[in-house]
Amino acid sequence: MESILHDVRLALRSWLKRPGFNSLVVLTLALGIGANAAVFSVVDAVLLRPLPYRDPGKLAVLRTELVETGDLASKSSPPEVADFRALDGVFDSAGAIWVRPAALTDDRSEPEEIEMGFVTAGFLSIFGVDPLLGRDILSEEDVPNAPAVAVLSHGLWERRYGADPGIVGTTIEMDGEPLTIVGVMPTGFALHLPADAGVPPSLDAWVAWGGGYEESPRAFRVLTAVGRIRDSIGIEEARVRVSALARRLAADYPEDYAASGLRLHLDPLQTSLTAPIRPALLVLWTTVGFVLFIACANVANLLLVRATSMEHEVLVRRALGASRSRLLRQIVVESVLLSLAGGVAGALLAEWTVSILPLLSPGDIPRLAETSVDGRVLALLTAASIVSGIGIGLVSAFHLSRTGSSLALRSRGAGESGQNRLRRLLVAGEIALSLVLLAGGGLLLRSFHALSRVELGYETDRVATFKVSLIDSAYPYSGPSKIALFYRELTFAIDELAGVDSAGASTDLPLDGASSGLAPYAYESDRELVEWDRVSADYRTVTPGWLEALDARLLEGRLFEWTDDLDHPNVVVVDDLLAKTAWPGESALGKRLQVVTFVGGEFRRTWSEVVGVVAHVRQHPGAPGEEQIFVPHPQSPMRTMTFAIKSELSLETLSSAIREKVRTLEASQPIHSIRPMNDYRASALATHRFTMGMMGSFALVALALASLGVYGVMGFTVSRRTREIGLRMALGAAPRRILLDVLRDGLLLVGPGLSLGIVGALFLARFLSSLLFGVTASDPLTFVTVAGVLLAVAAIACYVPGRRASALNPLAALREE
């Protein structure tokens, strides 16, 4: 122990002698170690850390697949949820949730729009998180006509009710109806469900669904089902029993499933939650390891250069009796100390990186807010620092310890050729890995560029949006005309504002991240009648003016008018995908579709005439989406709608004017989520932007480190060939020739690295293929471009020492030697 402490003191003394050199080493290692720590902190929070629930490995999500139509989503109908919950011997508990906005209209404060979850009895208890106050919803409260109850989130309880400890048992007013508060969830509680469930992690309240599960249509798929698998069975056995349930349902309800077919999929909750982002994070985690290797290779090269200058000192110590193991240990100790210092600086870099991640707007990456440089990250950082330090130290120690003392005392050049070969090998590895990272970053950049230029079928510039959910008691579904009248009057009022071009509302807003509202339809053609459940489409109920506000391209016929109401024949507008599928080579105008409408609280199958065809309205830039059917709101009135307003007005001006118009029509009606449509487009691209930005940053760091490596090796080579270059120039070699020779040697050094890098990049591109859009994984333009960039940077790195060599004074060079 005492000898190790002595080595530490010697290492610190050596550090003080070369502060500039050692600071460069620490900074280089900090980049590699810090990048790894930052990415691991994200991977740990998102992929590795268990969900914050009791025994989270037992939680599973049910997905429903309609085989014929290819629809697969984490949504089920109320009858399917009832069948799921009744499945014997599989679940300790199971339930489901559906989310929609609601209005708090009590006298505690101003009316407030909140996100509310309709849940089955005991849904919150499935996650094993006990309420802070009160209890969960009971089974007798989840039946028709039962007294309404609610569980509040901790945030709403604090914000609106002042963290009143006596809140349980009191009555509040939600959507104009009284609800009794039976519980308050603890701070930080969040529902982590798959993105396509459309369930925000932080809801404001949970209320009972209200029973009537078996009476609902089996095509009404709005609920996300979750179950806790019994300890006595595993996930595979549970999947077998759920698949058997699907077969039984298909046999028992042929009118609902015979045409479409039914499969039920049971997936672990954590796997379902992280599936969309898992490939990107694993690729980032792999590539950031390349950055660490490049940093270590660079430091090893620096230490080899320094080792050359230390040869005489080391050989004198060997001649005086110092053992090889003693010298090796001291060099490794010094290297580990440098690496640990790099780890400390890397921890600071990782902490800074993690703090700015939310500013990068990385989309729907689950649990990203939980990312932190905690003990697990610091343990990885420390291990990476020690392993890197030992590896780097062994490289230089091994070469120094090989030098023969008697020969070395006579010739300080002994062993130089071996060290030079190793330095060249390390630089070739840096070049190869840099090209891999640059190719990956280039592919993601081209993919992001292609995504951002996708033709959406509508415009997002100068379009503002807001959401409104009518108060249930004031606008019951039993009075559809009153609902339709409110939206008609509000649309007219907004249209009258100076600076507004057009306005309208829809049940779903493109780019909002919600899963499509897929439902069956049927259609007539000259060839056949395609029956219900054999095809499905993405339904949107829209008011007149909504398609106009988005500048949706009308390809044929007309758009909706306010006279398309319950007193007139039913009509629909379809997109060009559906028109081409149903009536290829024909005009869709005048054709008939059987669609789902919602009138008076009931879903109906209604034959409607196609009056218009529009260009497909993309739900996401990266996916064309399903065929679309637009139903006029006056013929299928819905309470919850999202407005789109095309306007020249600022968002602040428009927001004040809209609130004024809403208060004029309904004084207690809140609105929320006022934001530009471009925000939704940016959010839709955020995950791609995050992955591209991280990969691009790593690639630039790798490029800088690799260029420094090339510069270092060529600079050292030139410095060791000073006498040779001087002699050649004295014999008549032109400076231009010397420069070209150095450039040639440098590019020969880079060549093998480029060749290996292209092979590695092609291998990496296979894993990136699921993240790409509009570009192939072996895109030749990307590979040629990044190889050219790397070659150009390497040429510049070679040019500087080459230029210095060509400017040598031959006599001075010969005297130096």
Image: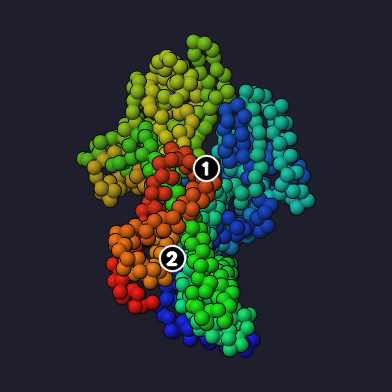
Q: Which residue is mark 1?
A: 770
Q: Position of residue 338 (x, y in %)?
A: 50, 76
Where the N terminus falls, by quadrant?
A: bottom right
Kindly identify the amino acid type of the residue bearing the numbered disc 1.
Ser
Side of 554 where 581 appears, left or right: right
> Measured along the vertical axis of the image, is residue 24 above or below residue 160?
below
> Residue 84, labelled with which disc?
none
Q: Which residue is pictured at 31% across the width and 62% down the height?
A: 733
Q: Residue at x 29, y 38 (%)?
A: 646
Q: Secondary structure at mark 1?
A: helix
Q: Is residue 147 in sight in this rendering?
A: no
Q: Whole-percent x and y of residue 643?
A: 36, 39
Instruction: Tell which of 482 and 121 is nearer to you.
Output: 121
Distance Cα–Cα, label 2 vs label 1: 38 Å
Q: Residue furthest front?
A: 731
In the structure shown, which secondary structural element does the residue marked by tag 2 occupy? helix
Q: Residues within 10 Å of mark 1 (few under 14, many from 20)?
A: few
Q: Residue at x 30, y 63 (%)?
A: 732
Between circles 2 and 1, the one closer to the viewer is: 2
For the C terminus, give its image quadrant: bottom left
Q: Residue 713's mark?
A: 2
Q: Nearer the viewer, residue 597 or 230?
A: 230
User: Residue 44, position in %: x, y?
Assistant: 57, 60
**Dot 2, how many residues are within 10 Å of its Cα: few (below 14), some (14-19), or many (20+)?**
many
The residue furthest left is 498
Decide which of 490, 665 is in the foreground and name it: 490
Residue at x 49%, y 58% (from the top left corner)? 428
Residue 250 in percent (x, y) is at: 69, 28
Q: Is residue 747 visible?
A: yes
Tell me which label, 2 or 1, sits earlier in the chain. Answer: 2
